[in-house]
Amino acid sequence: MDLAIQLQQLSHLLKPYPFGIGGSCLLWQLGLENNPGDIDVVCREQDFDSICERLAQHYRPEAVSFNPDFVTRHFARFSQPGARDIELMAGIAVLQQGKPIEWTFHPERCSWQNDICFMPASDWLELYSLFNRPKRVEILREYLAELSNNLAD
């Protein structure tokens, strides 16, 4: 399935809830990645179960592997033949030096573009830092610095 079409269908399906698409799909939308592996969706904790139920009507729930460094309170994966997997997260947190570091989702920062609800690049810069993804952090830092320089001109 074409990525843009899947993202539009997913955004339409989740429209009743505050959510945002980020990760490699956001990088793709910004022109920073060619082929996202999956679709990262972030939502509020109170909407997680309802969104899971809605996704399960169209996608197959998948088993999730345990990572001791990620202590996100809600995480689920969904798949569908011929489409990219969806990873749904809420209550995002990681362990750093044995202490949980939490990240708060702000749905009001998300924006709709081409019928797709994307999270801001600045939020994913924070998340990639939290997830210890240095290459992605550098890509977004450069993008945001260039964007800032262009706005200043």
Image (tube, rainbow, N blue to C red):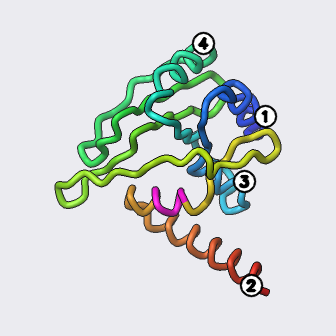
Contact (CB < 8 A) between labels 3 and 1? Answer: no
x, y percent for residue 71: 29, 42
Give the x, y percent position of residue 105: 49, 47
Q: In this view, does 75 lie to the left or right of 60?
A: left
Magenta segment's dominant SS is: helix
**Which residue is situated farthest in the front direction here?**
108
Res. 83 image quadrant:
top right
What residue would you read off at disc 2?
152
Residue range in magenta is 123-127
Q: How far apart are marks 4 and 1 (CA)?
A: 18 Å
Q: Position of residue 107 (x, y in %)?
A: 58, 44
Residue type at tag 4: Gln
Left or right: 33 as drawn, with respect to 93: right
Where residue 5 is drawn, which disc sits there? 1
SS for callout 2: helix
Query: Does residue 82 appear anywhere in the picture?
Result: no
Distance between the alpha carbons at the discs numbered 3 and 1: 13 Å
Q: How far apart are marks 2 and 1 (CA)?
A: 34 Å
Label 2: how many residues lie within 10 Å, few (<14), some (14-19) or many (20+)? Answer: few
Between residues 74 and 47, which one lies in front from this camera angle? 47
Residue 60 visible in the shown view: yes
In this view, the mark in front (4 or 1): 4
Q: In this view, does 54 lie above or below 18?
A: above
Residue sitting at 25 percent across and 58 percent down?
A: 96
The residue type indicated by label 1 comes to: Ile
Residue at mark 4: 57
Label located before the other in sequence (4 or 1): 1
Determine contact: label 2, label 4, CB under 8 Å.
no
